Image (tube, grey):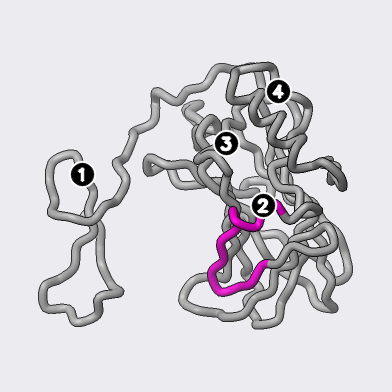
Amino acid sequence: MLITMKRGGALAAMVLLAGIAKGRQPAPEVVLFDFSTGENESLIRTEGATARAAEGALHITVTNKGESPPSVFLLPSRGHWDLSGYRYVEMNVRNPGDKDVALALFVFVPGGWGGISTFPLHANGREVIRARATHTLKIDLHQRFPDGTESIDPRNVTHLRIVFYTNTPGTAIDVLCVGAVAQAPAEPHAISGRLHVPKVIEGPPARGKRVYMQLPDYSSPALRYVL
């Protein structure tokens, strides 16, 4: 269970993450986001929602259903997190409302690997936060496919995404703390078994590239495909 740091949390997280970057043995847990200081607000992005750090928590409120689920993105301060020394990412949340809220937490990495969520611990990665209750969402950073290949490379986590599946405007949750916990399993990484897919970019198609394309006679600039 991740314990929220009320004082000095951001500094402690920076010290611990610096240790990870230098290859030291990680501590049993590391705080990635401590909302008691307000220092992480520049690393938060929203889509169809608002996010405000106050009273030791990140208060998230759904504002617009939109075409995709309302989301909040949590970004690392130095481009990525190396969480390979930890088993889980945990997020402690509180539902301040009178109705249940369905949401999921995702961990993303680059190179076409996509992301993982609390699945298979919970079907579709979705969890229900009961009204007026607190809850911990947990992601296994070392999920593997049947052939033993890891689902993601936990050494290169680019962002976390909180996705609301209860998308009624006004729906709200409070995120109390986000961190990495528990020692990683001893088995070696199987990263070499993964196909590294180039990042999607703008420009003409060429060998070794993935680019955005659009049908020449289609009038909507918002609808494109990837080649």
Q: CA distance from mark 3 to mark 1?
A: 26 Å
Residue 152, percent across and down?
50, 36
Depth check, mark 1 against mark 2: the one in front is: 2
Q: Residues within 10 Å of mark 4 (few under 14, many from 20)?
A: many
- Image quadrant holding the N terminus, namely top right
Calculate the distance from the C-alpha at mark 4 to the C-alpha at mark 2.
22 Å
Q: Is residue 10 left or right of 202 when viewed as pictured?
A: right
The local crowd at label 2, few if under 14, some if 14 to 19, many if 20 or more residues have their Cα within 10 Å, is some
Stretch in magenta: 39-51
Cα–Cα span, label 1 and label 4: 37 Å
- Tell me the kind of residue under disc 3: Trp
* Nearest to the observer: residue 15 or residue 128: 15
Residue depicted at 55% across the width and 17% down the height: 188
Q: Which mark is residue 209?
A: 1
Which residue is tagged 3?
A: 81
Q: Which quadrant holds the C terminus?
A: bottom left
Residue at position x 67%, y 63% from top?
Answer: 103
Query: Of the residues under marks 3 and 2, which one precedes in the sequence?
Result: 2
- Please tell me which residue lies in front, 58 or 71: 58
114 to 38, vertically: above or below: above
**Would you identify the image quadrant in which residue 170 lies?**
bottom right
Q: Are marks 1 and 4 in contact (CB under 8 Å)?
A: no
- The answer to whether residue 208 is left or right of residue 197 is left
Depth check, front residue: 27 or 182: 27
45 relative to 196, above or below: below
* Sequence-first tag of 1 and 2: 2
Instruction: Say which of marks 4 and 2 sits in front.
Output: 2
Q: Secondary structure at mark 2?
A: loop
Few, some or many residues within 10 Å of mark 1 (<14, 14–19, 20+): some
Distance of label 3 from label 4 (alpha carbons): 13 Å
Is residue 48 located in the magenta-colored stretch of the structure? yes
In the rendered image, which residue does mark 4 sit on? 26
